[in-house]
Amino acid sequence: MRLSGANAREDKADPLIGIILTALAALLIVGVLTFASPCVDHDGGEVGSCFWAARAILGVAVVMLILSIVRIFERDEGERRGLSFAVACLGVLVALMPGVLIDLCAIPTMRCHTSMHPFCIAAGTLAALVGGVDLILRLLRLTKKA
């Protein structure tokens, strides 16, 4: 049975936002593992708080990636809203993780302060904005239908 109008749109997958969120999550994972990695061992063989902040960010980014991939194929409008909300919340968590929730090392010229911290703020804020704007637009469409 073929649906028409707004119902047909809800039946199709809406992948654009999911693809954007997937790309942001993948960039976050690659960045924290490569160009925005934390400080290298400067505590005489022991890993510092920068290492653990990066590991926490990596864990959150993997969850964000999984939810974003699911978001690409999801057809249910309510599920799309929920996934966008979850990724937006995880974006806020990523932005707050280094320096706010987990202290970084005391040396302000180290990589964790100069590259990882600003990168995570930017990537997390972008994910939060994309997920949040998608959620708001979908909620506005929902209220217009009622």
Image (cartoon, helix red, strand yellow):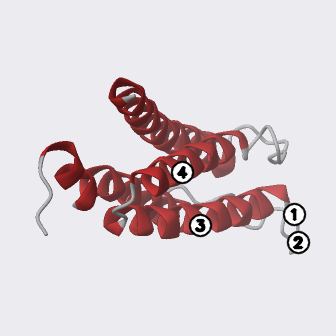
Residue 3 image-quadrant placement:
bottom left
Label ID, residue 43 = 1
**The one of 8 and 110 positioned closer to us in this rendering:** 8
SS at mark 4 in the image: helix
Residue that sits furthest to the front in the current view:
1
Residue tagged 2: 46
Give the position of the C terminus as an image quadrant. Answer: top left
Tell me which amino acid carries mark 4: Gly
According to the picture, the residue beneath numbered tag 4 turns out to be 82
Residue 48 percent location from the top left of the image: 85, 61
**Distance of label 2 from label 3 (alpha carbons):** 27 Å
Cα separation, mark 2 vs mark 4, equals 40 Å
User: For residue 72, which numbered disc appears in the image?
Assistant: none
Task: Give me the disc on residue 63.
Answer: 3
**Residues at marks 1 and 2, CA–CA distance in whole angstroms:** 5 Å
Q: Of the residues under marks 4 and 3, which one precedes in the sequence? A: 3
Front of the two marks 3 and 1: 3
Image check: 98 left or right of 14? Answer: right
The crowding category of the residue bearing disc 3, from other C-alpha atoms within 10 Å (few below 14, some 14 to 19, many at least 20), is: some
Is the residue under label 2 in contact with that under label 1 (CB below 8 Å)? yes
The residue positioned 83% from the left and 48% from the top of the image is 102
